[in-house]
Amino acid sequence: MKRFASLTNNVVTAFVVLIVFLLIIPLPTFILDFLFIFQIGLSLVILMMSMYVREPLEFSIFPTLLLITTLFRLGLNISSTRSILTNAGS
């Protein structure tokens, strides 16, 4: 069980680092499109999970999940704005 907790911590840390890379590295539009589709799908999964939870403790990770997905969406917004402003000049 301890290995699983360590693995999830590493995955969350890697995901946050990837969000920071979204802010720094300009991405091609097809990757941005895929990430927007992934974000919408993830949001629908979270919505469905929260609707079918019987007890609040079953979904105790919700605040952390909401924070990470909000940071991901913010990184996508900044990256897409950068892409729009960069391509508008050419």
Image (cartoon, helix red, strand yellow):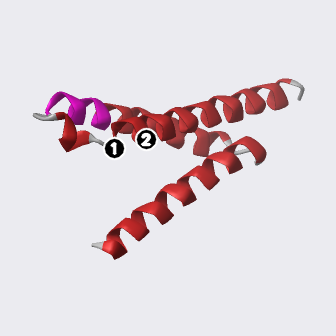
The disc label shown at residue 43, or none:
none
Residues under labels 2 and 1: Cα distance? 6 Å
* Residue at 13% in and 35% down: 55
The disc label shown at residue 64, or none:
2
Region rendered in magenta: 45-52
* Residue at 33% in and 43% down: 61
Image position of 51 (left or right of 26) = left
Q: Which residue is mark 1?
A: 61
Marks 2 & 1, CB-CB < 8 Å contact = yes
**Quadrant containing the N terminus in the rendered view:** bottom left
Secondary structure that dominates the magenta span: helix
Q: Position of residue 85 (x, y in %)?
A: 81, 25
Q: Position of residue 23 (x, y in %)?
A: 72, 41
Image position of 28 (left or right of 31) = right
- Packing grade of label 2 (10 A; few <14, some 14-19, many >=20) is few
Q: Position of residue 22 (x, y in %)?
A: 68, 45
**Quadrant containing the C terminus in the rendered view:** top right
* Residue at 18% in and 43% down: 58
* Residue at 20% in and 41% down: 57
Q: Quadrant of residue 4?
A: bottom left
